[in-house]
């Protein structure tokens, strides 16, 4: 695993971000919420906890009991997905489109693969998890948080 420092900005340039990528991984989420939020699959880069800094008019939307999504108040660009659970509240997944060439990272995982539209397909040999796979892991995670 190698970490790399990345910088990016929204479409209009009003929001800038800087963070350290947790690893060389680019992820894709095909869940209904991510597709509606981004207009496509959500391509994301996980940030090392504590490494995110940003400037500009960021707005957040509580999309569930455990997460919020952020966007630029001026142009609407997707900025991040953030877990808001007390034990994981420093988990940020930044939109890969904010940085040039998606930070040069390689796609390593797709989730909610059974929710993606039929005509979409990302190349490469990487794990692909269904809605049931992801939600089973999340249920286990939530049990641990509540202990």
Image (cartoon, rainbow, N blue to C red):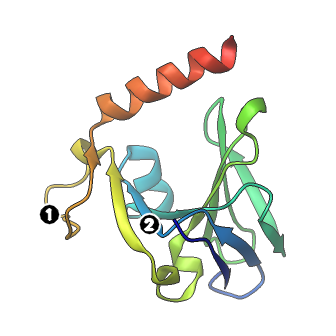
Q: Nearer the viewer, mark 2 or mark 1?
A: 2
Residue in the image at 47% along x and 87% along y: 101
Q: Secondary structure at mark 1?
A: loop
**Mark closer to the chain start, 2 or 1:** 2
Residue in the image at 38% along x and 45% along y: 31
Name of the residue lying farthest toward the front: 1
Q: Is residue 127 left or right of residue 49?
A: left
Residue in the image at 58% along x and 21% along y: 142
140 over 38 or under it: above or below: above
Name the foreground residue: 8 vs 119: 8
Q: Which residue is mark 2?
A: 26
Name the foreground residue: 109 vs 40: 109
Res. 8 in view: yes
Report the disc number at residue 94.
none
Q: Give percent across and percent down for residue 85.
A: 72, 32
Res. 9 in view: no
Q: Is residue 129 left or right of residue 99?
A: left
Q: Give percent across and percent down for residue 144.
A: 61, 18
Q: Give percent across and percent down for residue 126.
A: 26, 58
Q: Is residue 33 left or right of residue 52?
A: left
Q: Quadrant of residue 112?
A: top left
88 over 76 or under it: above or below: above
Q: How many marks?
A: 2
Q: Quadrant of residue 70?
A: bottom right
Q: Which residue is mark 1?
A: 119
Where, quadrant-wise, is the C terminus in this rendering?
Answer: top right
Q: Secondary structure at mark 2?
A: strand
């Amino acid at each position: 695993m190698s970490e790399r420092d990345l910088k990016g900005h929204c479409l209009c340039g009003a929001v800038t971000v800087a963070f350290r990528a947790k690893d060389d991984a680019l992820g894709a989420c095909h869940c209904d919420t991510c597709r509606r939020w981004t207009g496509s699959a959500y391509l994301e880069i996980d940030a090392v906890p504590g490494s995110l800094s940003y400037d500009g008019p960021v707005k957040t939307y509580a999309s569930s009991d455990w997460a919020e999504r952020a966007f630029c108040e001026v142009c609407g660009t997707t900025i991040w997905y953030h877990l808001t659970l007390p034990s994981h509240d420093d988990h940020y997944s930044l939109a890969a489109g904010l940085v040039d060439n998606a930070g040069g990272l390689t796609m390593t995982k797709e989730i909610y693969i059974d929710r993606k539209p039929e005509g979409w397909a990302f190349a490469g040999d990487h794990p692909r998890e269904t809605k049931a796979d992801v939600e089973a892991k999340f249920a286990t995670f939530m049990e641990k948080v509540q202990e």
